[in-house]
Amino acid sequence: MSTSLHAAYVPAFIGMLNNMKGWLDLAAATGNEADLIGAKLTDDMFPLARQIQIASDAAKGAGARMTGTEAPAMADEESTFAELKARCDKTIAFLQSLDAAAFDAGASREVVITFPNGGGVKFDGQTFLTQFATPNFYFHATTTYAILRANGVGIGKQNFLGHLAPYMFAPPA
C-alpha cells in the first residue's frame, strides 16, 4: 500500500499545530504570558512568538510550494497567546484547504528558495518536503516546546504527542 505525501505530511502538520495551541493554553495558566512570549532558550535563538511564527510559515510554505499556490500572508506581529493560536488556526485552515492530488503532484515540482543574501537551495518537491520543510517545522515546534518547558510550563511528552490521543488504548486489566 502506497501512502500519498499529502496523507503523510498534512495531518501531521495539523496535529502538531493543534498541540502547540494546547501548549499555549497550559502556558496561559501560569499567568506569565508577557515573559513567556519573549522567552528564549539562549541569546542567539528566536523567542517563543517567533518560533511559532516560523513553524506556521514552514507548514503553510510547504503546502503552498507542493501545490503551486500562494500561502496566506501573515504579518508576524502576534504578541499574545490568543494571537498565536489564531495564527495556528489560519495555518490549519489553509492546510485543510489544499487539494490532495495537487499536493502529491508537487513531488516532482522544482522548489527554489532564495535566501536574503541571494544564495539559496533548489530541490524537487519530495526532497523539499522530506528533507527541508518537515525538519524545519519540527525544529521550531520542538524549540517552542522546550522554551515553555524550560520556563516552568507543566508540559511533557504526552503534550508533544497529544495529536495521537485518538489512537491510545488502555493496558489490559
Image (cartoon, rainbow, N blue to C red):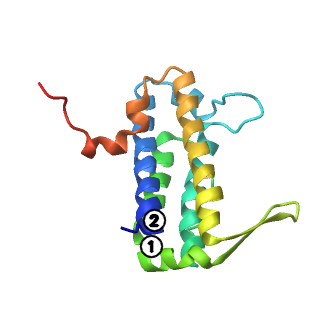
Q: Quadrant of the N terminus?
A: bottom left
Where does residue 167 sit, x and y in percent of width and height? 26, 45
Name the amino acid type tagged 2.
Leu
Residue in front for this viewpoint, 139 or 2: 2
Residue extending furthest front? Answer: 1
Question: In the structure shown, which secondary structural element does the residue marked by tag 2 occupy?
Answer: helix
Where does residue 89 sit, x and y in percent of width and height? 43, 56
Occupied quadrant, residue 132 = bottom right
Count neighbours of disc 2 (C-alpha within 10 A) and say few if under 14, some if 14 to 19, many if 20 or more. Answer: many
Residue in front for this viewpoint, 6 or 58: 6
The residues tagged by marks 1 and 2 sit, at their Cα atoms, a distance apart of 5 Å
Residue 4 shown left or right of residue 67 in the figure: left
Which label number is shown at residue 55?
none
Q: Is residue 69 visible?
A: no
Q: Would you place residue 52 above or below residue 28 in this image?
A: below
Residue extending furthest left? Answer: 173
Where does residue 70 sit, x and y in percent of width and height? 58, 75
Q: Residue under circle 1?
A: 98
Q: Residue at x 51, y 30 (%)?
A: 33
Question: In the structure shown, which secondary structural element does the residue marked by tag 1 occupy?
Answer: loop
Residue in front for this viewpoint, 105 or 64: 105
Q: Is residue 41 visible?
A: yes
Q: Residue at x 45, y 47 (%)?
A: 16
Q: Quadrant of the C terminus?
A: top left
Q: Residue under circle 2?
A: 95
Q: Are marks 1 and 2 in contact (CB under 8 Å)?
A: yes
Name the amino acid type tagged 1.
Leu
